[in-house]
């Protein structure tokens, strides 16, 4: 028997739209997979924007107006 983990699929960011003070991020996803989004101004210190954002489709769009002006970097990672 061979088992392929349906949650172990690569994903990529397809759209980043930055409007002060907000951001909209869209990425390819696996339905049912949780994702986390973080922000940083220096790539060293990261703060959480959202955790356990569960994908309901093959694309996820996350939008918020809670991003300070100095933030320049965002990262998305799969949850567990």
Image (cartoon, rainbow, N blue to C red):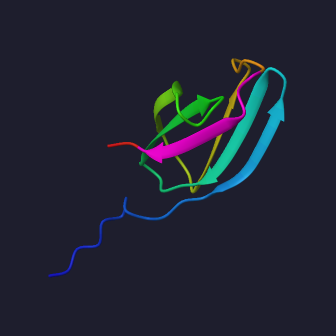
Q: Nearer the viewer, residue 38 or 30?
A: 38
Q: Is residue 69 above or below residue 29?
A: above
As for residue 30 lying within the magenta part, the answer is no
Q: Nearer the viewer, residue 10 or 43?
A: 43
What's the residue at 63%, 52% (across, down)?
27
What's the residue at 42%, 48% (across, down)?
32
Q: Quadrant of residue 9?
A: bottom left
Task: Point out the stretch of residues depicted in magenta.
Answer: 70-78
Residue 27 seen in the figure: yes
Q: Is residue 3 above or below residue 19?
A: below
What's the residue at 48%, 56% (across, down)?
30
In the picture as drawn, the residue positioned furthest to the left comes out as 1
Q: Nearer the viewer, residue 12 or 39?
A: 39
Quarter of the image where the N terminus is located? bottom left
What's the residue at 63%, 38% (across, down)?
74
Measured as percent of width and height from the top left, residue 53 is found at 49, 35
Q: How many marks?
A: 0
């Amino acid at each position: 028997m061979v088992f392929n983990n349906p949650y172990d699929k690569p994903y990529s960011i397809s759209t980043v739209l930055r409007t002060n003070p907000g951001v909209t991020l869209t990425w390819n996803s696996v339905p049912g997979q949780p994702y986390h989004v973080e922000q940083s101004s220096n790539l060293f210190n990261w703060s959480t924007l959202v955790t356990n954002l569960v994908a309901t489709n093959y694309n996820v769009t996350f939008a918020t107006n809670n991003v300070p002006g100095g933030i320049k970097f965002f990262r998305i990672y799969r949850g567990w």
